[in-house]
Image (tube, helix red, strand yellow):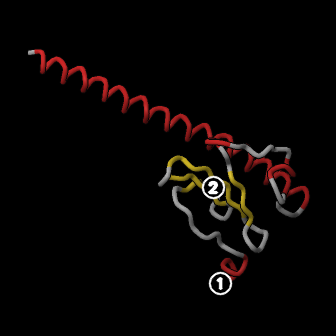
Amino acid sequence: MMKRKALMTLGIVLLLFCFWYFHLRVYRENKLIDEGNVIVKKIENFKNKNNRLPQSLEEIGMREKKGANVLDYNIDRDGINYRISFIMSIDHSKIYYSDSKKWEDYYRDMRTASDTLE
């Protein structure tokens, strides 16, 4: 009886921990995507106004973030497309690609101007 009660308690604690962990992960991912979407709008506004991509996030008035919530900004070699990414865990990232205008889960090469001409 005592053993069964202890196993039940352990099961409930484990279940609550899993719920808490996954809920926080989804919350964090959604929060970072929302922040990333704000950055995308600022980049697109900058691009429309200046006919080029900003060289850094600071050029659009954003400060570099340090720590677990860091967003990374990269421009392709042609200066046409860009990606914004953040790491969710060791094996999971969320990456916005301007060539597809979508958030994706995996790293890939950005399409270049020559890719669109083919």
**In the rendering, at what x and y percent does residue 109 appear?**
61, 70
The C terminus, quarter of image? bottom right
Cα distance between the residues tagged 1 and 2: 23 Å
Q: Quadrant of residue 69?
A: top right
**Residue 105 in the figure: left or right of residue 47:** left
Q: Residue furthest left?
A: 1
Three-letter amino acid code at the position of disc 1:
Glu
Amino acid type for the residue under numbered disc 2: Tyr
- Element under disc 1: loop
Seen at 67% across and 54% down, the residue is 84
Disc 1 crowd rating (10 Å Cα; few below 14, some 14-19, many 20+) is few
Which residue in the structure is indicated by mark 2? 96
Q: From the viewer's perspective, is residue 13 above or below residue 39?
A: above
Which residue bears the numbered disc 1?
118
State the image quarter where residue 55 is shown. Answer: bottom right
Q: Residues within 10 Å of mark 2 (few under 14, many from 20)?
A: many
Q: Position of residue 96 (x, y in %)?
A: 63, 55
Horizontally, residue 27 falls left or right of residue 111, namely left
